[in-house]
Amino acid sequence: MIGVFYFRSSRASLPSISSVYADWNNQDYESVYKNTSLILNKRPLDGEALALNGFAAYYMYVGQTEPSAAYMYLDSSITNLRKAWYRVSDTEKPQISYILGKAYYHRGHYYSDLAMKYLDYADSAGLQYDDLQEFRGLAAAQLGEYEIAIDAFTEALAKKPSDLLLYTIAQNYNNIGDIEKSKQYLLETIRTTNDEVLQLKCRYMLGEILFFEGDIEDAKKEFDLILEKDENSADAHYGLGVIYENQGDLVRARAEWRRAIRLNPVHPGARQKLNL
């Protein structure tokens, strides 16, 4: 009986590509991944199955909460999409490059150059997905290409406005030294966001900028506003300490830095100031 069962199993028909597409349209990525894996066991060079398997693996990665399983799917996605790239027509490559670029971005900053390569390919091909420019901006920022990042984020903002994009653009303008533009975007984020945590991040960056511009009183106002909302902000206490240091009041400065250390024992700025 065992021999007969094995014989019948080995002759069982493979899932059809049409059934795989039906699962894809229903967003049943687990089924797509499983059935394309069965196809690839028999036809490992099937470009269509490789692409669909890679797409499904990426979306399963996004939906995973368990880290080891998530990165298994991410690696599977990258591996099979790279294989598919060489086995599909040129008209199918932009879709593969779009998902492959995002997968490489999620793989970590060491892969940012590959993320940028494939996302640029998708962009040059004219793909219009809402998050394409955002991912391009993120990859460019990781590579230190801040002006490219600003252009990409600005395009993403025009398509789908978001307070987080405003803040990210402010960060990148700050990175290239365009302080006025950075302040404009920080103030716009503060004005429009309902996210209190993001608002406090903006105020801290704004306080730092104002301090380095020599506007000490307005910088202090920003740090005080943060502490009115969150008295446990280690960053705000650190910022106040720097202001007191600048004013020659080292007693109050060190007191603020010690508060910062109590709230965040690994705060780099406070540890450096206190020689810890």
Image: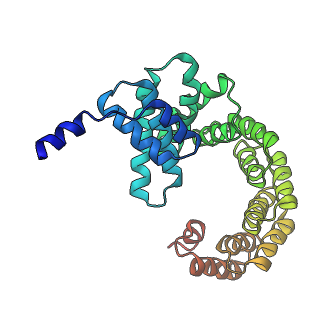
125 to 240, vertically: above or below: above
Q: Position of residue 199 (x, y in %)?
A: 78, 64
Q: Residue at x 53, y 35 (%)?
A: 21
| Left/right of residue 251 with respect to residue 31 in the rendered view | right
Tell me which corner region of the image, top left, top right, bottom left or bottom right, holds residue 136. top right
- Answer whether residue 171 is visible to the viewer in this image: yes
Q: Position of residue 146 (x, y in %)?
A: 67, 39
- Answer whether residue 109 is visible to the viewer in this image: no
Q: Residue at x 77, y 57 (%)?
A: 209
Residue sitting at the far top:
90
- Relative to the observer, which residue lies in front, 223 or 66? 66
| Left/right of residue 10 with respect to residue 94 in the rendered view | left
240 to 205, vertically: above or below: below
Q: Residue at x 48, y 49 (%)?
A: 61
Q: Position of residue 71 (x, y in %)?
A: 42, 50
Question: So how many labels did they put on this image?
Answer: 0
146 to 43, vertically: above or below: below
Q: Position of residue 236 (x, y in %)?
A: 71, 72
- Relative to the observer, which residue lies in front, 108 or 222? 108
Q: Residue at x 50, y 43 (%)?
A: 58
- Relative to the observer, which residue lies in front, 123 or 137? 123
- Its colouring scheme is rainbow
- Relative to the observer, which residue lies in front, 266 or 30? 30
